[in-house]
Image (tube, grey):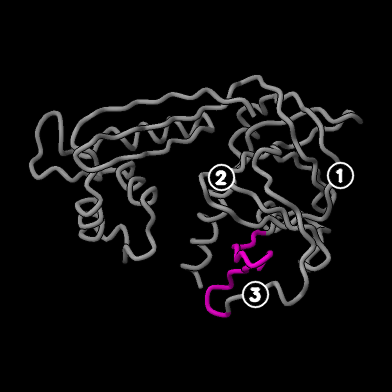
Amino acid sequence: MLYIWIEIQDDGKGLDKNKIIKKALEKKLISSSKTLQDQDIFDLIFLPGFSTAEKVTDISGRGVGMDVVRKNIDELHGMVDTESKLNEGTLFRIRIPNTMAIIEGMVVIVGGERYVIPTQSVIKASSPKSDHVIKSTKTLKEMIDLDGELLQLFRLAAFYNVKGAITRPTDSIILVLEENHKRFGLMVDQILKQQQFVVKGLGKTLGAVPGVSGGTIMSDGSVGIILDVGLLIQSLLYSQKGREEVL
């Protein structure tokens, strides 16, 4: 998919990761910082009400603003990445999808549905063996070992509640997808083809579906759903977190 990129950079003090973690622990936004990567830490500044300022003034310390930025970007199906070095400065990189674009996409089948995944996000496809699939008895997370690389496995059929899809990973195709330097496995029934597609908006009704960036008209006249890998992985992880809290 084609994107509009906006970069905003300063040469200020940068973001203090230790101060951010300390404040997040105080507000009980996180329980531990052991597994947090830099991007995970920087993402905390976008939470409503979050601020590391010691004093509240008319222009700072209220924790208002960054959450609004993130909300507006999310509504445009965009993403924002943050890079920062202490005492050197901060870079915000905003990515917003073009409303009309042509993408190179891979058509996959899940149950009776067809989805288009941008090929730039696809690293490889694999048919796993039974001993390559690992399931945690505590969290119910599925992991898959592909060529020595252990990745979390997600089922597209389960997330979108698609009936009639393959349920056994060994009978399916696992796509290794990468977004923002993170890889994960996505389970689909089969790969149909690869070609270019014109991206079309889905309107207000379908435009709010998690992980979906648009639609396209297939060669037989039917509608294919185009997935945004970045939004999809965010939605998958969020839904999984909710399930784990219930468990």
Going by the numbered disc 2, the residue's amino acid type is Glu
Q: Which residues are magenta?
A: 137-154
Q: CA distance from mark 3 to mark 2?
A: 23 Å
On screen, 146 above or below 193? below
| Three-letter amino acid code at the position of disc 1 | Leu
Give the amino acid at mark 3. Answer: Ile
Whether 36 is drawn above or below 205: the answer is below
Where disc 1 sits, the SS reads strand
Assess whether residue 153 is covered by the magenta stretch. Answer: yes
Q: In the figure, 241 relative to 12: above or below? A: below
Q: Which mark is residue 21?
A: none
Residue sitting nearer the eye, 5 or 164 = 5
Secondary structure of residue under mark 3: strand
User: Which residue is drawn at the image coordinates 49% and 30% (left, top)?
Assistant: 95
Q: CA distance from mark 1 to mark 2?
A: 22 Å
Query: Which of pointers 3 and 2 lies earlier in the amino acid sequence?
Result: 3
Q: From this viewpoint, which residue is outermost toward the bottom?
A: 137
Q: Is residue 141 left or right of residue 88?
A: right
Kindly identify which numbered label has been placed on residue 179: 2
Q: Which residue is mark 3?
A: 134
Residue at image x 56%, y 45%?
179
Residue nearer the viewer, 243 or 23: 23
Check disc 1 and report the residue beneath it.
192
